[in-house]
Image (tube, helix red, strand yellow):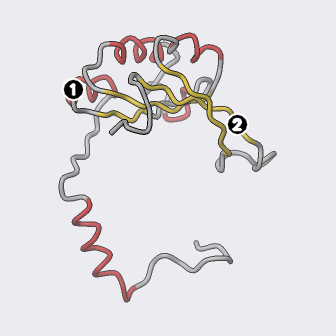
Amino acid sequence: MAGQDRPARFNLTTLEPDLEDLHARLAGVVIECLDWSDFLTRYDGPGTLFYLDPPYWGSEGDYGRALFDREAFSRMASRLASLKGRFLMSINDVPEIRALFAPFHLTEVTTRYTIGTRNDPKAKRAELLIINFKWDENTP
């Protein structure tokens, strides 16, 4: 449903060109349904850049009880240390995450959450961006 400040995005008059554009953009995309560890193993290589968005620390069960548990963070840190490729991970900034991922580059950022923030929707939250490569303006 569109908000009062903007029209609906669905427009029948542009449906055909929108679908053509979508088809072109997704032409080389592969969609997988794999465990994160299996996915890393399958696609890891020197030219690969992974983006990881695991459940937040303290919210491991939000996506299903058996999908990701607290110990998975340790397994993930260990697996990421052996990657041939690069990775970028976003996660909540808590001491436990800082400790587990200390061998990597940690960058603090702030954001505003739009889901589950009924009490304080404008509050800024601390997050971490974690990478295994040197980032600068010349990084491809």
Disc 1, SS: loop
Which callout, 1 or 2, points to the residue nearer the camera?
1
Number of on-image labels: 2
The image shows residue 11 at horizontal and vertical percentages of 43, 83
Question: How many residues crowd around disc 1 within 10 Å: few (fewer than 14), some, or many (20 or more)?
Answer: few
**Amino acid type for the residue under numbered disc 2:** Arg
Q: Is residue 51 above or below residue 68?
A: below
Residue 53 placement (x, y as % from top left): 46, 34
* Residue type, mark 1 in image: Pro
Q: Assess whether mark 2 and mark 1 are in contact (beta carbons under 8 angstroms).
A: no
Q: Quadrant of residue 56?
A: top right
Residue 125 image label: 2
Q: Residue at x 38, y 38 (%)?
A: 138
- Dot 1 or dot 2: first in sequence order is 1
Give the numbered dot on residue 46. Answer: 1
**Distance from the alpha carbon under mark 1 to that under mark 2:** 33 Å
Return the residue found at the far front: 138
Q: What residue is drawn where x is 61% and y is 14%?
A: 96
Q: Quadrant of residue 62?
A: top right
In this rendering, is residue 69 above or below 74?
below
Q: Secondary structure at mark 2?
A: strand
Q: Nearer the viewer, residue 45 or 70?
A: 45
> Which image quadrant: the C terminus?
top left
Find residue 23 and report its horizontal and vertical position in percent.
23, 66
Give me the residue at 44% from left, 24% from top: 66
Q: Nearer the viewer, residue 17 or 1?
A: 17
Give the side of residue 71 with respect to residue 26, left or right: right
Q: Relative to residue 73, is residue 7 drawn left or right?
A: right
The quadrant of the picture occupied by the N terminus is bottom right
